[in-house]
Amino acid sequence: MRRSAAAVAVLAVVAAGCGAQERDGGGGKPDAPDKPRAAGLSWAYERIDEVDGELIDGAVMAPDDIWAVGSDGAGTDGRFARGHLLHFDGEKWSRKPMPVEGDPALSRLESLGSAGIRLSTVEGTSSARGKPRHALWDGTRWGPVKNAPAGPLTHVEVIAPDDVWVLQGDGKVTHWDGRRWTVTPMPAKRIVALAGSAPDDVWAVGSRTTGPGIGGAGGQVSQPAAMRYDGEKWTLTKTPTMRFPAPVPPEPFAGFTEIDVASKTYALAVGQHSFKGYDAEENPDPRPSSFALRWNGSRWTEAEPFPGACAYRRPVTRDGDGGFFMDGNWHLAADGACTKIGKPRLPATGGVRPESEQQLWLKRIVPVPGTDKVIGFGTVDVLQSGPPASKAVVVTLKR
């Protein structure tokens, strides 16, 4: 559930969410899990690197096949520079060399179900012109990407090992059925995000340039588009149309920027209504606005803030039980409970002082398929006198 900077900005001001970044939805709550969630969530350190550095991303192929990408030391520009991989084989974590060259700070790992794990990085030099570099883990070894979707991947939704949906950087939606990748025709062409909760509950959102609300007196260029896959076909659902009051600004447009799906009766989509160009007349232009809509199983309605302290927090990823992890290290459960996740202190070893201030930053949180385990990858910034320290860490959730 990755987000662009624009999506983050929208979610920061829209009320809705859950999980490690809280969330609820307009007037209702996600479906309750089969069994109640234990209270008092906290993170526990599973691995603390001895070398100063950070973990940038992580992905899971199986409980005994987990990968992370990290970096050590600081380059001349002050950023971490020397990249490496970290692998868990079911018994221990071990360092592995990077199978690609590039800037580790711009690296990404994506689980593609039974198709493997894809590593993408950017060289980060002016001569490279941002050319991406890719490698694929097939469960045994890293090799070149041959049949997987090419180019940058914007969103990846793993429903099952043989049921994976991918949104590519060029807007194509591609599906993996366990044997091959297939580009899927969509009802609307401008797609920016996708998510799903089941084989017959996958969503793609963006905007459309034809149909109700396009053109006319307001000259609306685009309207929000939300498409649902029911296991057989994609269908464009009915969403509200957006209009600016007169005087209408130049080239008004509207579209979804992000969607989160917890169940068949709970999905949250956020978007923006804005305009292009500049109106130099005396009448001031209206302000662009953000909006949030909630799917209740049959229709889209206006979303309300998440409950409690999660009211205006941003969802980071689903928790596997119908809830969400929210930003700021919070959790929104399926029953609407919003709680802070506890975090431990680093042991006073390796240059870490007992009196130091410590900040845990998780770059990726991933539920491990087939288990109740949740794993996080990131860094702990150690604030103390003398040289600063940053420890790369792997954490697991204690319930």
Image: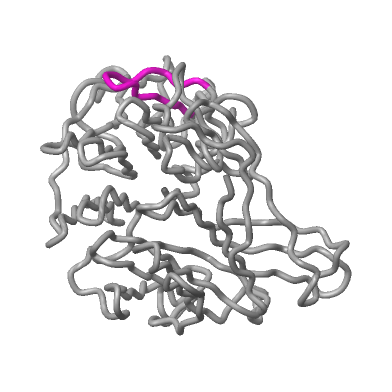
Locate residue 229 relative to residue 284 in the image: left or right. Answer: left
What secondary structure do most residues of the magenta stretch adopt? strand
**Residue 87 quadrant:** bottom left
| Residue 79 x/y as whole percent | 63, 73
356 up-or-down from 209: above or below: below
Q: Is residue 304 visible?
A: yes
Q: In percent of the image, x 25 and y 50: which residue is there?
A: 165
| Residue 270 x/y as whole percent | 42, 32
Locate residue 195 relative to residue 128 in the image: left or right. Answer: left
Task: Name the outermost residue toward the bottom.
Answer: 97
**Residue 38 quadrant:** top right
Q: In percent of the image, x 80 and y 63: which residue is there?
A: 383
241 up-or-down from 79: above or below: above
The answer to which of 198 and 171 lies nearer the viewer is 198
| Residue 23 x/y as whole percent | 52, 32
How many numbered tags mark residues here?
0
Q: Is residue 24 magenta?
A: no
102 up-or-down from 172: above or below: below
| Quarter placement of the C terminus | top right
Q: In percent of the image, x 59 and y 28: which residue is there?
A: 311
Q: Is residue 221 visible?
A: no
Where does the magenta region start and end?
290-304
Q: In percent of the image, x 67 and y 69: which residue is there?
A: 391
